[in-house]
Image (spheres, rainbow, N blue to C red):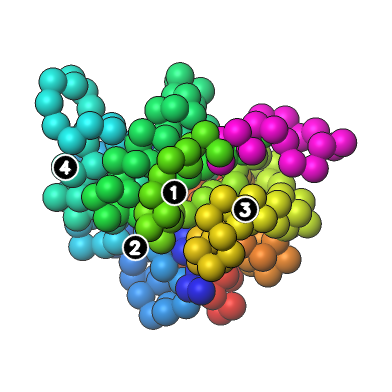
Amino acid sequence: MKKIIIANWKMNPKTPRDASRLADKIGRGVKNIKSVEVVFAPPFIHIPAIYKFKTGAQDCFYEKSGAYTGEVSPLQLKACGVRLVIVGHSERRALGETNEIVNKKLKAVLGTGMRAILCVGEAERQKEIAFPKIIRDELHEGLSRIKKSFFRNLIIAYEPIWAIGTGRADTPKNVYEITTIIRRELYRMVGKRIASKIPVLYGGSVDDKNSYAFVKDGAVDGLLVGGASLNANKFVKLVKAVAGL
Ligand code: PGA
């Protein structure tokens, strides 16, 4: 499976011009890398500025159109060239997004034929519990009553909240253990044939020094990168490390 690395720019950079410069610089650096798919997830307003690249969105609403002031629909994103939408990021959950809302958003995104990344992760590391209930609930409630055929475009990102933006990344060993349980849970839900094709990523303080270890020892199919994706040199190094260059 080709590795996938998503650059989650969050609420950065300031101008469309800065966004296009950052994407151009990274694009030049990773141009010849074939074994890794790089996707940029900028704020909505910068999507047109980087249309040349594979683009994702950081969120969306679950309705197709209508009187929903301030919201953006999956169909609108798709029309702007977006191919993938991050759903249920912990920073959105912290603003009130529930598993029920995440479930509606996943259905809406997958219904358009775009790919969706479902983010799951615990707030605190609980040593005695191998698989925190919160992750199980995020998976089961987030994926409740989703058509089996939609799972083809699903990606899971394991992002322990305590590791996001803190510089305290998880260990590859722990990521291996948790993502193995996540994969097993997916097998139970949709069967091995479909589940084995669902990429499982890691996110949380990934940088150019640890990216390779997560993919090799953590055995994940890719990475969701925040802070380090805003520095072109660092991000290119991070991608190259995963590609084994
Ligand atoms: P970080 O963010 O790489 O800055 O920890 C990851 C994420 O929020 O997806």
Q: Which of 85 and 212 is in front in this view?
A: 85
Q: What residue type is labelled 1?
A: Ile
Residue tagged by mark 3? 188
Residue 241 x/y as whole percent? 58, 70
Instruction: Report if the CB atoms under discs 1 and 2 are less than 8 Å apart.
Output: no
**Label 1, residues with CA under 10 Å away: few <14, some 14-19, many ≥20:** many
Residue tagged by mark 4? 76
Residue tagged by mark 1? 117
- Measure the C-alpha gap from mark 1 to mark 3: 19 Å
Does residue 36 appear left or right of residue 183 in this picture? left
Q: Which SS class for mark 4?
A: helix
Residue tagged by mark 2? 25
Q: Nearer the viewer, residue 106 or 32?
A: 106
Residue 40 x/y as whole percent? 35, 54
The residue carrying mark 2 has its beta carbon less than 8 Å from ligand 1: no
Residue at image coords 56%, 39%: 140
Front of the two marks 4 and 2: 4
Instruction: Report if the CB atoms under discs 4 and 2 are less than 8 Å apart.
Output: no
Q: What residue type is labelled 4?
A: Gln
Q: In the rendered structure, which segment of residues is drawn in magenta?
A: 123-139
Q: Nearer the viewer, residue 114 or 227?
A: 114
